[in-house]
Structures are given as C-alpha cells and as structure tokens.
Image: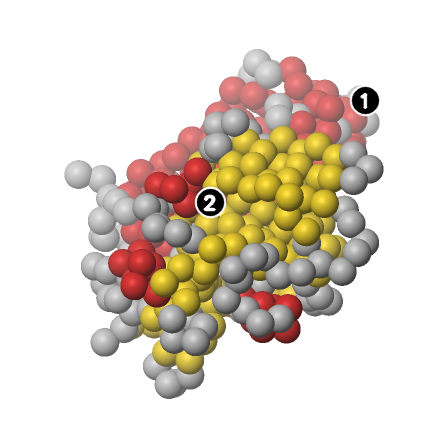
Amino acid sequence: MKTVYQLINYFIAAVWLINGLYCKLLGLVPRHEEIVARILGEEHSRILTSVIGISEIIMAIWIISGIKIKLNVILQMIVIAVMNIIEFILAPDLLLWGHYNSLFAFLFIVLIYTNKFLIPQKKHDNIMMSYLKNHPFAVEAFFESSLVFTFAVPKEELQNFIPECLELDTFDDKWAFVAAAMVQTKNLRPKGFPKFMGNDFFLIGYRVFVRYTNKAGKRLRGLYILKSETDKKKMEIMGNIFTHYNYTTTDIHQTEDKSTTEIHSVQSKFMVKLSKTDQEISLPEHSPFADWKEARRFAGPLPFTFTYNETTKEVLIIEGVRQNWIPKPVKVIDYHFDFLNTLQLKNPILANTFIIKNIPYYWKKGKIESWK
C-alpha cells in the first residue's frame, strides 16, 4: 500500500508531466504558448514552449527518481514562484484562474515543501493536514476595522466550553467573557509575501477570553475560538486547511447612512446596528465594568490564541502582533447573535463594544508544547 508521501509525490510529478507534455509539448492547451509569446516574444514562441515543456517532463522524471531530493524541492519552489510572479505581472488575463493562479501556486509550493521535509514517510494519512493546521508559517494582514461585542457571563456557564489546559480570564472572580468580533481584513497572506497575493474578506469570530500557563510558568492572556465565519468560500477552504478555527461561509451585508451602520447575515441570523454619534458614550446597561478603562481589558483581540489537542495533550499557541491599537467605544442601537443562543447561556450581558480601525497585524508561526 502506498504511503501518503508516495501518493503526493506522484501527484506532484503528474502536475509537471501534464503541463509539460499535454499543455506545452503537444500544444493541446494553446493558452500556454500564448503566455510564452507574451513574455518572451512571438518569433520563437513555439520552440520555446516546447523547450519549457521538455524541461517540465524532465522535472517529473527527476521527482519520481528520488535523486537529490532536497535540491529538487528547492528548484521546484523557485521555478514555480518565479514563473507565477512573471505571469501574474505580464499575462494575468491568459491564466486559467487569473490573479488567483498565485494562490494555487502558493498552495502547490506548500504541498511540495511539506511532503518532502515535514511528513515522515511512513506515518498515517492525516499527518500532513495536522501539520498544516498548526500555523506552519507567519501570516500578516491589515485590519480595516475590527468591531468587538463582549458579553459577560457567570464563569460557571462558560467553563465547559474551554479545554482542560485553559482557565477562564475572569473579572472580579465572577464574570467570564465571550466575544463576537467582526473584522474587515485586507491582504491576508504569508508574512513577507507581496500584497497582491493576499486575500480580502470579512470575518466574524466567536471567542472566549482565557488564560494559559506555559512550561516556563508564565500566564498568557488569550482567546479560545468557538466558531469562525467568513464571506468568502476560498477563505473557508484555506482557513480550515491552516487553522483549527472551524470556518464556514455565510452572507454578510453592510449598510450605512448618515447616522447609523448596520451589519447583518440572513443565513447566520446575526445583526448589529450602531450609532455614528459624536456624543460621549456610556457603558452598556448592566455592564459589570465601572468605566471604559476597566472595559478595555476585555476589548480583544488578546495577544495569544490557543488550540488544544486532547489526544496528544498538546497546546498550539499563536501569538499576534499589532500596532496602533486604540479601541474606541461604540454606541449600540440593537444587536442579535443567533450563535450565542445555541450556546444556551442563561443571560449574557453586553459588557462593552469597541471598534478599532486601520491596524497592521501579523501572527507568528504557531508553537506547540505538551501539557502535563
């Protein structure tokens, strides 16, 4: 029976072979020659296309041969990156998926790297996916806005929603907190990659405020993710490949007039309506906080996000780094979150609502440590 490593290796070789033989050498996909003509000129485009095709066939054979694997992988990644950057700039209209070709090229590079260097060749089939979900590289983005509704709940009601390695981050040893964060994100991409390879999307995430004591004895404040929703299918797919955040796709609608802003989803049954008032804003009625200074401690997002693997007793720690983090209170006219109802919390109290705008943000590569 073939291992995961071998099956993926054959798939990678097949991609090179199909592109080289079928698309270029046999000329059965004219678009490939058109791209070569656009980039290198029409005069010798047929010959150059054939040469490139032969090179890709040789690459496929090299992959299967297993000779000088490290050199092979490095060369594959460099060739794919360079080819796709040039095509993105000079011939995006001729690409199969247009500008999104760069996204698939990146995923192909990740697959090549992971298969050769990170997957033990005789492990089970889920090893690669488990690795990818653990934030194997740093990610950066720009938050156009981050709107956070934080709800106070008696700590006993939230205790069962977090894993054993975490403790609730409480206020007055009575209140625990769950938040709904709505984030308009631009240019989400692996850190260091050009902005054009990024993705823009809207995110709504439901998180519990928690603490974790690491191996060094340091208590870290952070978040535990209950659910994440986005308005882009590709973000759902990528989010569930590279995180444990349980992404689903939903509809997001935003409307504004001179005095109000409204965000709602028909499918997910949530709605928020905000006032654009310039007047001094009071804390929500029944908030456990005495003033906005206390409330800012639970404005989110916090520096760390935690995921727990109950089987291996390991904690995945992702650290976020932000700049110019200045939360501003928001006047709430009305709100409803159907997801909070599914948690069957008895009486969640709106504790604060903040908005933060125009924030550069990045997440470091995930770190895993054993617990107990």
Local packing at callout 1 (Cα closer than 10 Å; few below 14, some 14-19, many 20+) is few
Q: Residue at x 51, y 24 (%)?
A: 21
Crowding at dot 2, Cα within 10 Å, few <14 / some 14-19 / many 20+, comes out as many
Report the residue at 72% width, 36% height from top: 88
N-terminal label among 2 and 1: 1
Q: Nearer the viewer, residue 160 or 131?
A: 160
Q: Please identify the quarter of the rendering in which residue 282 is found.
A: bottom right
Mark sitting on residue 267? none
Q: How far apart are labels 2 and 1 at the CA level?
A: 52 Å
Q: Amino acid at mark 2?
A: Ser
Q: Give above or below for 155 relative to 285.
A: below
- Do the residues under discs 2 and 1 have CB atoms within 8 angstroms? no
Q: Residue 101 placed where, x, y %?
A: 61, 33
Expressed as whole percent of the image width and height from the top left, the position of residue 235 reads 53, 39
On screen, residue 329 versus residue 167, left or right, reads right
Q: Residue at x 78, y 49 (%)?
A: 277
Colour scheme in use: secondary structure
Left or right: residue 310 compared with residue 252: left
**Residue type highlighted by circle 1:** Glu
x then y, percent, for residue 81: 62, 45
Q: Position of residue 310 (x, y in %)?
A: 24, 60
Query: For residue 308, what is the image quadrant?
Result: bottom left
Residue, x 31% and y 58% (percent of image)? 157
Residue assigned mark 1 = 43
In this rendered view, identify the residue nearer to me: 154 or 45.
154
Q: Is residue 127 visible?
A: yes
Instruction: Check disc 1 and report its element: helix, strand or loop.
Output: loop
Which residue does the numbered mark 2 point to in the structure image?
Answer: 228
Mark 2 or mark 1: which is in front? 2
Q: Quadrant of residue 97?
A: top right
Q: Is residue 67 visible?
A: no
Which SS class for mark 2? strand
